[in-house]
Image: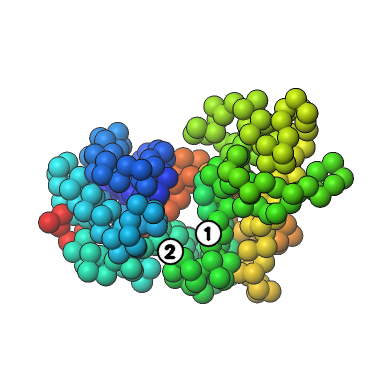
Amino acid sequence: MSVLALDIGGANLKAVHSAGGAREVVFALWERAGELGDRLGALSAEMGAAERWLVTMTGEMCDCFAGKREGVRVILEAVRGAAGKVGVREVGVWTTGGEMVSVERAMGEPLTCAAANWHALGTWAGREYTGGATVVIDTGSTTTDVMYLRGGRLAAVGLTDTDRLASGELVYIGARRTGVMGLGRSVLWRGREVGLMNELFATTGDVFCLTGDARGGDEADRDEAGAAARLVRMIGGDLEGVGVEGARELARALAGMAVGGVSMAVTRVVAGRAVDRVVVSGSGAFVAEAAAHGALAGVAVERLAERIGEAASVAACAYALCRLGECEGAGSAGGVG
């Protein structure tokens, strides 16, 4: 049975088809929740027909929803409507309990489906890396997930966003959308500790544009002069006073802070336990890799892109969900309804 796996986030939609092909598209769910069904239908047309859709999400946290329950249900209603229009036979939803369930069951137990995409990735990775201990670091545009696997099993401390933020398994540092003000209160620049303005003048997308690390998507076309102008505002400057080279120096310092934040989380999650390998994925895999080397010096780091391809690595959670669905086959989820 052909499968289309969908990872529905607040800022991006990611899709992987069992016949091949992976995509990430920008979609501001918090602004356009009512258009989600139409966008999923269009994405399905771009990816190719599938008999079965598999869904995971983080978009339920968008502030256009009163809470997670409402968010999950609105997203699933959009999925169900879109799937029915394109002739999908079955829809499955991944839960943090490690199950693929029907839309009807997911509607009745919405909190088990909230922010479950990392769990799908960790579960699949456990089946791929069965020997010893593995740390998976998936850095996307907005967040980083850190997962510890032992003997092929996901050893998660937290299942909810709140618990994972407390444990370090979830870090709100990404490669594109993180506000620079979220990296710290100050930055060491040109020998001085300079406070960062508490304004959303610039994001990590600007930082990594100037360091040369920006990869793919809208980041590939980001204007360096614009990024530099936005970034120096964070220290109360402008390009006339700071210059482009000064902005690059600032970007390198801020990049180090972003990597350091993820590295600290990895250290917390590992907590002195043995690690045999690190696997990095996501559109910000370069951040994850640098953080891994900082936290776990000497441990081998594998780029998931080398195993499954760059596009699939960017959509790693959707890729994992697709592979899990193929292994389970039909019958583990209900019809479209």
Q: Which element carries disc 1, helix, strand or loop? A: strand
Q: Amino acid at mark 2?
A: His
Residue plotted at (30% across, 46% down): 33
Residue plotted at (63% across, 57% down): 262
Q: Is residue 123 left or right of residue 44?
A: right
Query: Any mark on residue 145, and which?
Result: 1
Residue 41, given in percent of the width and then of the height, sits at: 24, 39
Asked whether 296 or 110 is in front, the reply is: 110
Mark toward the start of the polypeptide (2 vs 1): 2
Q: Is residue 292 left or right of residue 71?
A: right
Residue plotted at (15% across, 42% down): 85
Q: Which element carries disc 2, helix, strand or loop? A: helix
Return the residue found at the far left.
337
In the rendered image, which residue does mark 2 sit on? 119
Asked whether 124 or 261 is in front, the reply is: 261
Q: Is residue 123 left or right of residue 307?
A: left
Residue 312, given in percent of the width and then of the height, sits at: 45, 44
* Residue 253 vertical placement versus 278 (above, below): above
Confirm whether residue 206 shows in the render: yes
Tell me the distance, in whole angstroms, between the alpha carbons under discs 2 and 1: 10 Å
Number of disc labels: 2
Query: Any mark on residue 233, and which?
Result: none
Asked whether 270 or 214 is in front, the reply is: 214
Residue 233, given in percent of the width and then of the height, sits at: 68, 37
